[in-house]
């Protein structure tokens, strides 16, 4: 499953741009600084951006992260595919298989050294063609919860799919294994999974540059 | 199979690799009959593009025979096809708008992470052009796996030989789109920097689109002679002050449109290279985007700037003031090859466009390293190299 923790801080293009024009930037920065003194804002009300896009500091208080992607397919089709959790193994790389019994799904996740980690989730909310939310059960080795929402994209562009997940890494050896599976960065894993979901739905297959089957 | 592989700066070798297989349903396998070395391959050869790994197979201009097809390919075994260098799924937001080189689904999910921090959005997949664009094995090989083979490759009718159609894979549509991006109106004066393959095709295209006068700028006599043969007036920038000359040759108005078919010169795109260039610049003042700055200065007020030349990173001392104050329009981008192939194939078939004049050398694939070396260091004589897998090296 797409396990998100915190938004990744990649190489920062703004820093690069600043370096590239270091001399001029120093002067402009000084100007901006002096202007900001004259334009101080005392109270900053909430804005319309998702909470997970808040600047760091505010963000640390939120274990929940997510990502939105536009997929050029009808909302009902995408919902139906996702609703059958057994399908998710098609585009979630670490997930070996998912078995579904009613509202409960058992996810078998491949971990290093041939270990397997089991995640058991129960659907806690469902709005047909719009929303699926799930939470790990007490029988699960990982504590996680997530929701995926499907909204019509504007101008007939298909569907905006938003996946939001919060995830608590387990303690001890299992925690280390799980961290390895998700490369310490569940957000990266989740991003890749949404992209692969999009590829599967739009192109009918998942792009690879491998030249051979194995 | 045999394939040309990259190993480092100015180090390419022909080696044996496993043959490709059908991996995805829409794949096809092409047996390559002709494959060209491109000017942008020289950026890889010079080691200024990041994201290449030793052993990567290069080449993005290729054509050949279909030898195997996946269950969802629309190609048939035995068909002759030219393959666009841009890999496009055909169904995403961008492909539906014919912006094929912006395809969302052709760069593998994990490789999209390489370019997203650099550009704000992930690049699409390209053949043989670094892992930023997917790390797809390229076409300077005996066989190529072609993904989404129902969208990209164009079937070539009998009667047209390889040399006539090979450049549909990249440089011909790239030159055409460069001219289209210049927004040419009947009788316009158009200046083109760089008489490499893309510049030459841009000249040819601009004239077909109704330009009254095309002025070509380069330093190599052979390339300038080719430009003149196509109908352009020429400027040798080693002997002439370009800005002044362009003003005089356009009645003091300046060219209506300018095309930068040079792109980055010995200029990388990653932070360390940027810093290197900055340091070097202090000492030697080496401009790595001289053509673009000059083009922006030369173009008339309200004119159009087309940039088919390849850039990768950040640009220092960009004449943004000239751009704004003169009210210029800039258009650029990797070529949406699939948008143009059908129309250009028709024009070739009807004899309206000839591309064979460009080819200076034809070599067996085994001789590819020599092709790279000469195309890089002997640019006056080596205007375009076509490799022919399956032919023998002459002794
Ligand atoms: Zn090319
Ligand atoms: Zn696409």
Image (spheres, coloured by chain):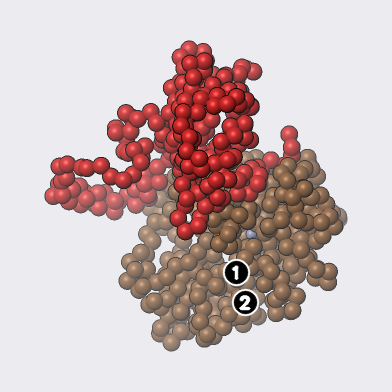
Q: Residue at x 53, y 30 (%)?
A: A1
Disc 2, SS? helix
Residue B212 versus residue B226 in the image, above or below: below
The residue sitting at the left extreme is A38
- Disc 1, ligand 1: is the CB inside 8 Å? no
Left or right of B26 on screen, residue B295: left
Mark 1 element type: helix
Q: Are marks 1 and 2 in contact (CB under 8 Å)?
A: yes
**Whereabouts is ligand 1, in terms of quadrant?**
bottom right
The image position of residue A187, as x and y in percent, is: 47, 33
* Residue at position x 29%, y 32% in the image: A57
Percent position of residue B120, x then y: 45, 48
Chain coloured brown in the rendered structure: B
Q: Which residue is mark 1?
A: B175
Precedes in sequence: disc 1 or disc 2: 1
Residue A134 makes an appearance in the image:
yes
Q: Is residue B268 visible?
A: no
Identify whether A212 is placed above or below B234: above
Q: Nearer the viewer, residue B16 or A55?
A: A55
Horizontal side, residue A170 vs residue B126: left or right: left
Identify which residue, B259 or B135, lies in the foreground: B135
Q: Which mark is residue A129?
A: none
- Which residue corresponds to the image point at 70% horizontal and 76% vertical from the top-left? B347
Q: Badge 1: how crowded within 10 Å, few (<14), some, or many (20+)?
A: many
Q: Which chain is mark 1 on? A: B
Q: On the image, numbered disc 2 is attached to which residue?
A: B204
Q: What residue occupies the far top of the structure in this picture? A: A172
Q: Colour of chain A?
A: red
Instruction: Indicate the quadrant where residue B178 lies.
Output: bottom right
**Which of the image's four quarters has the C terminus of chain A?**
top right
Q: Residues within 10 Å of mark 2 (few under 14, many from 20)?
A: many
Tell which subunit mark 2 falls on. Answer: B
């Amino acid at each position: 499953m797409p396990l998100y923790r915190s938004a990744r801080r990649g190489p920062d293009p703004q820093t690069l741009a600043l370096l590239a024009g270091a001399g001029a930037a120093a002067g402009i920065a000084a100007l901006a600084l002096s202007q900001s003194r004259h334009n101080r804002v005392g109270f900053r009300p909430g804005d319309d951006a998702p909470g997970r896009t808040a600047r760091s500091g505010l963000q640390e208080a939120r274990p929940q992260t997510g990502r939105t992607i536009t997929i050029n397919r009808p909302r009902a089709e995408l919902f139906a595919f996702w609703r059958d959790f057994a399908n998710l193994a098609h585009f979630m790389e670490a997930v070996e298989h998912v078995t579904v019994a009613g509202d409960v799904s058992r996810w078998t996740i491949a971990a290093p050294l041939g270990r397997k980690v089991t995640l058991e989730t129960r659907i806690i909310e469902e709005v047909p063609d719009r929303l699926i939310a799930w939470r790990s059960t007490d029988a699960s080795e990982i504590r996680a919860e997530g929701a995926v929402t499907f909204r019509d994209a504007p101008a007939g562009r298909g569907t905006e799919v938003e996946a939001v997940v919060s995830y608590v890494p387990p303690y001890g050896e299992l925690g280390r294994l799980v961290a390895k599976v998700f490369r310490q960065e569940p957000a990266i894993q989740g991003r890749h999974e949404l992209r692969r979901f999009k590829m599967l739905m739009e192109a009918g297959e998942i792009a690879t540059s491998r030249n051979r089957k194995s | 199979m045999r394939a040309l592989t990259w190993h480092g700066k100015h180090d390419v070798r022909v080696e044996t690799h496993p043959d490709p297989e059908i991996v995805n349903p829409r794949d096809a396998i092409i047996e390559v009959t002709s494959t060209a070395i491109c000017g942008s391959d020289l950026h890889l050869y010079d080691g200024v593009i990041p994201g290449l790994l030793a052993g990567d197979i290069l080449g993005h201009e290729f054509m050949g025979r279909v030898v195997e097809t996946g269950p969802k390919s629309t190609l048939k075994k035995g068909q002759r096809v030219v393959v666009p260098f841009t890999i496009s799924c055909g169904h995403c937001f961008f492909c539906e708008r014919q912006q094929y080189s912006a395809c969302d689904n052709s760069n593998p999910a994990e490789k999209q992470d390489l370019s997203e921090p650099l550009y704000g959005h992930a690049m699409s997949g390209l053949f043989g052009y670094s892992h930023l664009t997917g790390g797809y094995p390229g076409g300077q090989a005996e066989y190529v796996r072609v993904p989404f083979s129902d969208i990209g490759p164009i079937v070539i009718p009998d009667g047209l030989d390889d040399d006539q159609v090979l450049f549909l894979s990249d440089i011909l549509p790239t030159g055409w789109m460069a001219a289209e991006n210049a927004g040419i109106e009947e009788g316009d004066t158009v200046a083109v920097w760089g008489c490499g393959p893309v510049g030459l095709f841009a000249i040819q295209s601009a004239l077909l689109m109704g330009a009254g006068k095309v002025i070509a700028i380069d330093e190599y006599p052979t390339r300038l002679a080719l430009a003149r043969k196509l109908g352009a007036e020429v400027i040798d920038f080693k002997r002439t002050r370009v800005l002044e000359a362009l003003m005089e040759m356009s009645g003091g108005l300046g060219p209506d449109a300018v095309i930068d078919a040079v792109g980055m010169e010995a200029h990388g795109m990653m932070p360390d290279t940027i810093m290197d260039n900055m340091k070097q610049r202090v000492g030697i003042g080496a401009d790595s985007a001289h053509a673009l700055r000059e083009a922006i200065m030369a173009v008339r007020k309200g004119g159009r700037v087309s940039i088919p030349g390849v850039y990768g990173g950040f640009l220092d001392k960009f004449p943004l003031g000239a751009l704004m104050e003169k009210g210029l329009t800039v258009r650029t981008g990797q070529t949406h090859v699939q948008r143009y192939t059908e129309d250009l194939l028709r024009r070739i078939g009807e004899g309206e466009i000839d591309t064979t004049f460009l080819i200076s050398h034809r070599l067996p694939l085994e001789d590819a390293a020599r092709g790279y070396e000469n195309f890089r260091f002997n640019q006056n004589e080596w205007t375009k190299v076509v490799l022919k897998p399956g032919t023998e090296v002459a002794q």
